[in-house]
Image: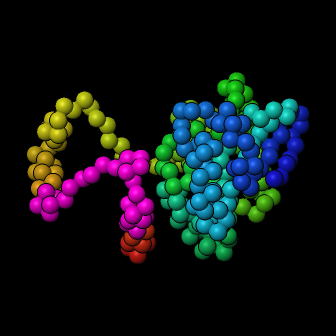
Amino acid sequence: METKKDAPNFTIRFLSEIEQLDAGQWNSICGNNYPFIRHEFLAALERTGCVEKQTGWEPHHATVYLDDRLCAVMPLYIKHHSYGEYVFDWAWADAYRRHRVEYYPKLLTAIPFTPSAGPRICVSDEAIRRRVTNFLTSEIMQLARTGGYSSWHLLFPDEAERKVLADGPLSQRTGCQFHWFNKDYSNFDQYLAAFTSRKRKMIKRERRRIAEQGLTLVKLTGSDIKEQHINTFYHFYQATYFKHAQLG
């Protein structure tokens, strides 16, 4: 665990494992509204080996103290590649390579393998959010400069956090995601009615082809999910990544 002091009140501490901080302390700051930033979720990724230096996700979480009282937490990773982020910066990495500059390692604030917008800098009191955000931004940028990291990236912040960050020295980039919303459709035909005739025919044809193959959908929850289901899912997951890597 590293410690660095900032005058007069704030102190930042970096954790090489999230379990170096008690779960109750972390969760008291991040709350219950967004499960992916909770201690249990991030700790599970570390305990299972999904997130560790060997997989290119080296934990370096930031915690901020105000007069020795924990007031903010932020997930932070030292990244040795760009996999699992769902934000594509391969062009940047290639530009660095062509100019013989190292792009990795870089610093990343994100939820591993989870392209879901939500809080990234959690504070105990909204009244100090801007001060904490400015302090953290300054400290992490300094860490990048002195620690040999090419850059710091913060992915998928929620809208309120994005606005606060936009006032600082960071460069902002935007991406595109597609989300489906149920606009009170009473049945599937009503949903189809929102499409053009050509698209309705295409969707019906695709559904008919699935039905002709005799496929059925079974929903499993809780203890109904067995080890063989997880292993099969993992195989499909690997195959998808392998296929796209080959195409790329």
Please determine whether, in this image, residue 217 is positioned above or below residue 49: above
What x and y, as percent, mark residue 103?
A: 65, 66
The answer to whether 68 is drawn above or below residue 82 in the figure is above
Q: Which residue is drawn at 10% across and 45% down?
A: 197
Residue 13 in picture, x, y percent from top left: 80, 46
Colouring method of the image: rainbow
Residue at left 72%, top 61%? 149
Q: Where are the magenta residues, as a range?
A: 209-237
Answer with left or right where residue 75 lies relative to residue 71.
Answer: left
Q: Vertically, is 72 above or below 245?
A: above
Specify the principal SS of the magenta part. Answer: helix
- Residue in the picture at 86% in, 40% down: 6
Tell me what residue is drawn at x 78 percent, y 60 percent: 147
> Viewer-proximal residue, 143 or 61?
61
> Which quadrant of the view contains residue 53?
bottom right
Coordinates of residue 134 in the picture (x, y in percent)? 73, 37
- What is the number of callouts on the image? 0
Horizontal side of 245 relative to 49 (left or right) equals left
Give the image location of residue 123, x and y in percent.
68, 33
- 53 relative position to 145: left or right: left
Residue 17 among those drawn in magenta: no
Is residue 244 visible in the rendered structure shown here? no
Instruction: Mark yes or no: residue 212 visible.
Output: yes
Q: Is 228 covered by the magenta stretch?
A: yes
Q: Closer to the camera, 35 or 117?
A: 35
- Frontmost residue, 107 versus 163: 107
Quadrant containing the C terminus is bottom left
